[in-house]
Amino acid sequence: MKDHWKLFGGAMLALLALTSIVAALMPTGFMKGLVVGGFLVAGPAALWSWIVQVTGTAPTMMGDVAEQWTAGELRKLRSRGWHLVNHFVLAKDDMDHVVVGPSHAMVLETKWSATPWDTPYGQEKLRQAIAQAKANARTFGLWHPIKSRRMSVEPIVVLWGGGTSTWPAERQLQNLGEATVVTGRGLPTWVNSIDAGPADHQQADEIWRALEAQIARRDPLDDLEHPLPPSLAEVATRIFVGCLFALAGLLGSGEILRVTNSAWITVGAASLSLVPAMILTRAPRARHAAYGWMAGAGLPALALAVAEVVYQLG
């Protein structure tokens, strides 16, 4: 979002300008209100959809959803003595899912694709996922609490989307030598088939305590190094608030001009209203409303001042 703020800001201003022009051309107050209402409803929705497409957020969203689906199935293992950690961090990159049982451990990578996995692009993406799962399994296996107990670590890749729901049963679970690949459709069956092996619950509990200690150390650092980006709902809310206050600033300036019939009084009043708005930009909760007001009141005031100067000089 931060990388494209000029693009988004320009789109919002263009949408606001277009709405103002169309509303001004409407013959009745009802029609003007209809145009403004359409802007308030459709404008933020259109920008939200545009953000999803331009920033490539849609695949990221689906990847996050797929990880939640995988985690939901893996939670069933807890009743059989397994421990589950999602987004476990040992090195620079996190591991999507780590499952530790009484006899061995598994490191899982969840991947979602809109492109069929059978295409050359899908196959290359699968090879990268397997390599990532292997690297993460090796890193986890070298972690002292695991290595000191000589616990084996199995790399697993879980595939979602990309036509996997139509694959035949024999392709829902495949052992490709380097890693086990299971589809989302085959995940419940695979989870139910997992054997804990020779039970050593004390060892599993000791590793679980080590996992908790690592999480307690890493999570605050990870939050500082990789702060979570705003959600799409939060982005959409910010855009809506900005558009709403921009429209309020525009209508307020228009009302002052109508009542006073003076361009310079309107420009002066709008300019004065920008002072508290500029101060409010420092407040995180009011920042987007302030930006919207500055756009809605400031830009029309600037245009009005320029038009008045040109008129007087002419």
Image (tube, rainbow, N blue to C red):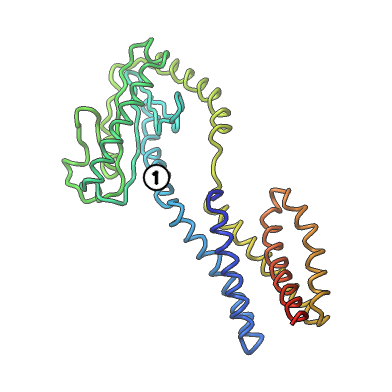
Residue 219's x, y, as percent?
Answer: 54, 29
Task: Give coordinates of residue 306: x percent, y percent.
Answer: 72, 73
Q: In this view of the protein, which residue sits in the foreground, 77 or 274?
A: 274
Q: Is residue 291 left or right of residue 53?
A: right
Picture residue at 19% right of the left edge, 47% below the top: 167
Left or right, 225 with respect to 125, comes to right
Question: Is 188 placed above or below 261 here?
Answer: above
Residue annotated with mark 1? 63
Q: Residue at x 68, y 58 (%)?
A: 291
Q: Looking at the picture, which amino acid does disc 1 mark?
A: Gly
Q: Is residue 144 left or right of residue 11?
A: left
Q: Is residue 129 above or below residue 66?
A: above
Out of 82 and 272, give the one closest to the viewer: 272
Answer above or below: position of 290 versus 297.
above
Q: Where residue 19 sits in the image (x, y, percent)?
A: 59, 75
> Seen from this angle, which residue lies furthest top?
148
Element under disc 1? helix
Tell me the crowding category of disc 1: few under 14, some 14 to 19, or many 20 or more residues within 10 angstroms, Cα based: some
Within the image, what quadrant is residue 233 found in? Answer: bottom right
